[in-house]
Amino acid sequence: MAGGASFGGDDDEGINAINVTPLVDIMLVLLIIFMVASTYIVKPSIEVDLPKAATGGDAMDTTLSIVIDPEGALFLNGEPSSEDAIAAKCKSVAAADEDAQAIIAADKATPHGTVVRIIDLVRQNGVMKFAINIEPYKKG
């Protein structure tokens, strides 16, 4: 062992590069997992074309969600329903919580009389707080 040579190479150089390929592979796998999982998280919704208004506020926590589609079909909390079922649900919710609220979303093609009839139905059955769901009007 002449000259004090070492077999490990020069210790002063250190590591000059980092291999990022495994990091990129892991990130791509995580991205795919989140993309697949997000399709199961999204709630099914009923498509309605909401009217626009500039002075709408944020929706509060609701107890009842009532949707009227363009054909006049009623949905209660995302499930097809009837006026009698909505009335019964309003009575039971109002009995359990005096601060119960209903959010009514109607397609803009829905006749005004239909919306007023549903508002009246909700109020007659004890739910005095209600809101009309709108799509915020975007200026410009």
Image (tube, rainbow, N blue to C red):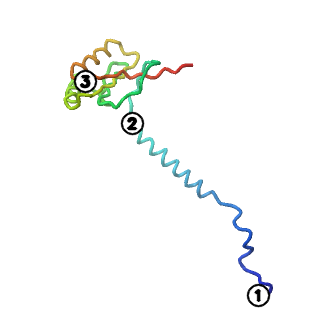
Q: Position of residue 73 (x, y in %)?
A: 32, 22
Of the residues shown, which amino acid type is indicated by label 2? Lys
- Quote the CA–CA distance across marks 1 and 2: 74 Å
The crowding category of the residue bearing disc 3, from other C-alpha atoms within 10 Å (few below 14, some 14 to 19, many at least 20), is many
Q: Nearer the viewer, mark 1 or mark 2?
A: 1
Tag 3's secondary structure?
Answer: loop
Mark number for residue 43? 2
Foreground pick, 89 / 101: 101
For label 3, the residue is: 127
Counting residues from the start of the chain, the first of labels 1 and 2 encountered is 1
Tag 1's secondary structure?
Answer: loop
Q: Position of residue 104 (x, y in %)?
A: 34, 23
- Quote the CA–CA distance across marks 1 and 3: 94 Å
Counting residues from the start of the chain, the first of labels 1 and 3 encountered is 1
For label 1, the residue is: 1
Q: Residue at x 47, y 18 (%)?
A: 54
Q: Residue at x 51, y 51 (%)?
A: 30
* As drawn, 17 above or below 134: below
Tag 2's secondary structure?
Answer: loop
Of the residues shown, which amino acid type is indicated by label 1? Met
Q: Nearer the viewer, mark 1 or mark 3?
A: 3
Q: Residue at x 80, y 84 (%)?
A: 3
Q: Quadrant of the C terminus?
A: top right
Q: Is residue 21 left or right of residue 32?
A: right
Foreground pick, 28 / 60: 60
Of the residues shown, which amino acid type is indicated by label 3? Val
- Quote the CA–CA distance across marks 3 and 2: 25 Å
The residue lying furthest to the right in this view is 3
Residue 4, quarter of the rendered image: bottom right
Q: Nearer the viewer, mark 3 or mark 2?
A: 3
Q: Position of residue 48 (x, y in %)?
A: 40, 23
